[in-house]
């Protein structure tokens, strides 16, 4: 009857010391169970989840699994109950043969922690094997004159069970001539011998049939039988004798097939057929007969197949020498196989992490592996190593397991892939080694912000650019990979002159190309300061900023603007007065112009395009001053027309023109008399109105001249009567004649006399102004001035102003 599986507990230390010779220590990392053989699949072995300190459902969550080397998996984990169960039928004899203690070792891996636990399961023998003789029938020969007490070797039985279930005794069927004796050998095996109790008489009985029974100690007792036929022979006085009772030989496992190992020798003093010996194996196992052969005549033992230390370390056999008279003797032969370093170490990767995050902590487990060498002694001792220049190390775990750990933080940007060379070498002579490559990829972590190639950028754009034109391209680099290196560009929120920058420029979020959203005007906007942000798509995202200065370059898109002479909004034209007495180089007027552009585009030059009297006036190239080129002559026309051009230095150059009208006269009547000849272009629809305006102006001018003439006559009469004027006549004689205008013998001192007349299409807007003049000299004394009559009807004009020179300017439409 099979006993239920049972787990050895620490409280049973005394029993464990006696039966198993093992120790259960809390925290030792070794878990021990015992279970009888031949259990059905799925039978309970132990509560592995409890012994690991886990809940049953955590077995799957933590990826707990069984790892073992080169062996059919005998046990499995039940994730529902958290138990260790049998994966198949377990046969102790198949696993451990005749070993008194049968232990199956494997490891439990908690993969998410890269932690491994050793598990030891003892397989308890049950009485499931019968004792078995190699031959069910055997013939034994004995001389008829053999003395009482003579022993005859009988075949022995084998029982695959161990302990109390193994072979315990033999029984012989009842026979008056023979009895049974059992001898225990040095190997612990029980050998039966047939002992002659009474002399034999071949003439009475030539054959004796006996039944030999082998019994084990199980419950119930199992047995096996063999039929022994004893043949009674004629007399043979001397039995063979081996030179040694036991032969021993030690050979290396790599000897060639057919090598002679040793020679067994027996002697027999008899002569003839009774002295001729033959050798044979007795009770040999199949393994013996398949590995060795024995020369029946010479007694030489040789190999017929290769020896393997890892398969069998020694071979025990029995050799029998028998003469022709059926007397025999036996000797033991022990062949010990010596280990040779013929097995390279083996590496078994139990758990491997192919990818590791670069922010993992030092000491993170990358791989768990075991090493094994089938050789023994120094040949089976191994050493593991990896290159020293790598940020990894090896750490020994339980049994022959090793952890591969990190020694410092990894940097994917420095090294993204590792190919770790694991070298395992044994201590044999010569040493054998195995090389394994463990690949490892370093997974990226978003630990690097994007970096711009420059600390700042600047670019320029010519004004009047098309909308949507590409301005500039910025580029940032992120040493990370994947989404962590995918960069998105944006502009920082800001305003310029109260307007968001996003209304001026935009940026392609993928390429970093900046585009103008409007046409820039240098005269309104000369510089933009932008901040470009580069952000990656990591989690969390990292970003960096860079400044970008955008300069708007001037383009020659503005024509020069003439400030003076100004053209009134009513369309009138200005007239400049040039006295006939002007010397060459006399400054008549100055054209003032500006250009809204800058630099070379704003450099202005002035030139004379057309003149009614060529050579009379010159224009300053850079100043715009209009001066007389020569002295004015009487034949020179009263009205001079000039067309001037103001041109910048842009490419292409832009220009503006202005038309100047010059009045050449020393006397006002001359100017007024020629007013009718000054024409200005008008629109066809205004011709009639202009005609009436000209007539009105002429009438007013005539009345004005008449008034002036009458006034002068009155003033001259008074002057003649005035003694003061006679007394000062001598002083006036030193004044240049050019400063006077004579009329009826009266000299008047006129230095500047200015009229401003504006005529428009609307007669209601026409006006005549007598501005306040500037005086350089005075003809009359202050007293005489106080007595003078006003020159104009207006009561706002003082009497002293009537004697001063007036500068006249006429504005005509």
Image: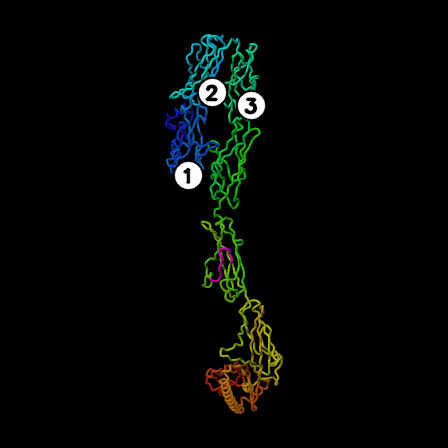
Distance, label 2 to label 1, CA atoms, is: 52 Å
Residue 311: where, in percent of width, then height? 51, 26
- Residue situated in front as seen by the camera: 171 or 243: 171
- Residue situated in front as seen by the camera: 699 or 195: 195
- Examine the rendering and report whether any part of residue 745 can be seen: yes
Mark 3 = which residue?
303
- Residue 790, above or below 604: below
Q: Pointers 3 and 2 in contact (CB under 8 A)?
A: no
* Residue mark closest to the camera, 3 vs 2: 2
Mark 1 = which residue?
62
Mark 2 = which residue?
134
Q: Is residue 649 left or right of residue 47?
A: right
Q: Disc 2 or 1, which lies upstream in sequence? A: 1
Residue 325: where, in percent of width, then height? 53, 11
Specify start and end residues of the magenta stretch as a single range.
503-513
* Residue mark closest to the camera, 3 vs 1: 3
């Amino acid at each position: 009857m099979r006993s239920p599986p049972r787990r050895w507990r620490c409280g049973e230390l005394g029993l464990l010391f006696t039966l198993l010779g093992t120790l259960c220590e809390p925290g030792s990392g070794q878990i021990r169970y015992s279970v009888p053989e031949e259990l059905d699949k799925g039978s309970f072995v132990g509560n592995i989840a409890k012994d690991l300190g886990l809940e049953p459902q955590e077995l799957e969550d933590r990826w707990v699994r069984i790892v073992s080397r080169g062996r059919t998996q005998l046990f499995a984990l039940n994730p529902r109950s958290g138990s260790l169960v049998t994966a198949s039928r377990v046969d102790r004899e198949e696993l451990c043969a005749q070993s008194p203690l049968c232990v199956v070792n494997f490891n439990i891996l908690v993969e998410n922690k890269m932690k491994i636990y050793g598990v030891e399961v003892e397989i308890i023998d049950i009485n499931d094997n019968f004792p078995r003789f190699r031959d069910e029938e055997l013939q034994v020969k004995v001389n008829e004159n053999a003395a009482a007490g003579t022993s005859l070797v009988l075949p022995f039985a084998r029982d695959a069970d161990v302990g109390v279930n193994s072979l315990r005794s033999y029984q012989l069927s009842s026979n008056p001539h023979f009895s049974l004796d059992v001898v225990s050998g040095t190997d612990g095996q029980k050998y039966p011998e047939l002992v002659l109790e009474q002399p034999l008489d071949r003439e009475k009985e030539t054959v004796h049939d006996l039944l030999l029974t082998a019994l084990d100690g199980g419950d119930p007792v199992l047995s096996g039988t063999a039929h022994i036929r004893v043949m009674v022979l004629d007399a043979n006085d001397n039995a063979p004798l081996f030179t040694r009772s036991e032969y021993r030989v030690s050979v290396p496992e790599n000897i060639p097939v057919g090598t002679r190992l040793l020679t067994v020798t027996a002697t027999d003093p008899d002569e003839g057929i009774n002295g001729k010996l033959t050798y044979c194996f007795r009770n040999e196992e199949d393994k013996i007969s398949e590995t060795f052969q024995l020369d029946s005549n010479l007694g030489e033992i040789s190999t017929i197949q290769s020896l393997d230390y890892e398969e069998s370390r020694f071979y025990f056999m029995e050799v029998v020498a028998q003469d022709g008279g059926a007397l025999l003797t036996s000797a033991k032969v022990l062949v010990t196989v010596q280990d040779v370093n013929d097995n390279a170490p083996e590496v078994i990767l139990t758990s491997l992490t192919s990818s590791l995050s670069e922010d993992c902590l030092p000491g993170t487990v990358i791989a768990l592996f075991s090493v094994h060498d089938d050789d023994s002694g120094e040949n089976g001792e191994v050493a593991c190593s990896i290159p020293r220049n790598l940020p990894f190390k090896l750490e020994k775990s339980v049994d022959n397991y090793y952890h591969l750990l990190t020694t410092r933080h990894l940097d994917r940007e420095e090294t993204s892939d590792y190919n770790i060379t694991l070298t395992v070498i044994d201590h044999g002579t010569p040493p054998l080694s195995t090389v394994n490559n463990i690949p490892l990829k370093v997974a990226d972590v978003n630990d690097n912000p994007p970096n711009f190639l420059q600390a700042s950028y600047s670019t320029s754009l010519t004004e009047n650019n098309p909308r949507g034109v590409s301005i500039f391209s910025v580029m940032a680099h992120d040493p990370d990979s994947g989404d962590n290196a995918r960069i998105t560009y944006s502009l920082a929120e800001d305003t310029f002159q109260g307007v968001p920058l996003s209304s001026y420029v935009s940026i392609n979020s993928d390429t970093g190309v900046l585009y103008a959203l409007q046409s820039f005007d240098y005269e309104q906007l000369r510089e933009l300061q932008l901040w470009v942000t580069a952000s990656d798509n990591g989690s969390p995202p990292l970003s960096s900023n860079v400044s970008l200065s955008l300069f708007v370059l001037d383009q020659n898109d503005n024509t020069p603007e003439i400030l003076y002479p100004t053209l009134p909004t009513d369309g009138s034209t200005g007239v400049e007065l040039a006295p006939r007495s002007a010397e060459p180089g006399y400054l008549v007027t100055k054209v003032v112009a500006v250009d809204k552009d800058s630099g070379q585009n704003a450099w202005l030059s002035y030139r004379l395009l057309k003149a009614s009297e060529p050579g009379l006036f010159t224009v300053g190239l850079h100043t715009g001053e209009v001066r007389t080129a020569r002295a004015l002559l009487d034949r020179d026309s009263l009205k001079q027309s000039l067309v001037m051009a103001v041109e910048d230095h842009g490419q292409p150059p832009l220009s503006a023109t202005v038309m100047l009208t010059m009045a050449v006269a020393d006397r006002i009547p001359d100017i007024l008399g020629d007013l009718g000849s000054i024409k200005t272009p008008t629109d066809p629809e205004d011709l009639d109105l202009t005609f009436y305006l000209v007539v009105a102006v002429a009438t007013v001018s005539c009345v004005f001249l008449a008034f002036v003439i009458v006034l002068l006559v009155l003033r001259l009469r008074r002057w003649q009567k005035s003694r003061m004027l006679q007394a000062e006549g001598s002083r006036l004689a030193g004044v240049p004649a050019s400063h006077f205008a004579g009329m009826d013998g009266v000299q008047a001192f006129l230095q500047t006399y200015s009229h401003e007349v504006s005529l428009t299409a609307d007669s209601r807007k026409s006006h005549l102004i007598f501005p306040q003049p500037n005086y350089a000299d005075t003809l009359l004394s202050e007293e005489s001035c106080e007595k003078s009559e006003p020159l104009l009807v207006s009561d706002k004009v003082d009497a002293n102003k009537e004697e001063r020179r007036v500068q006249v300017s006429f504005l005509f439409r």
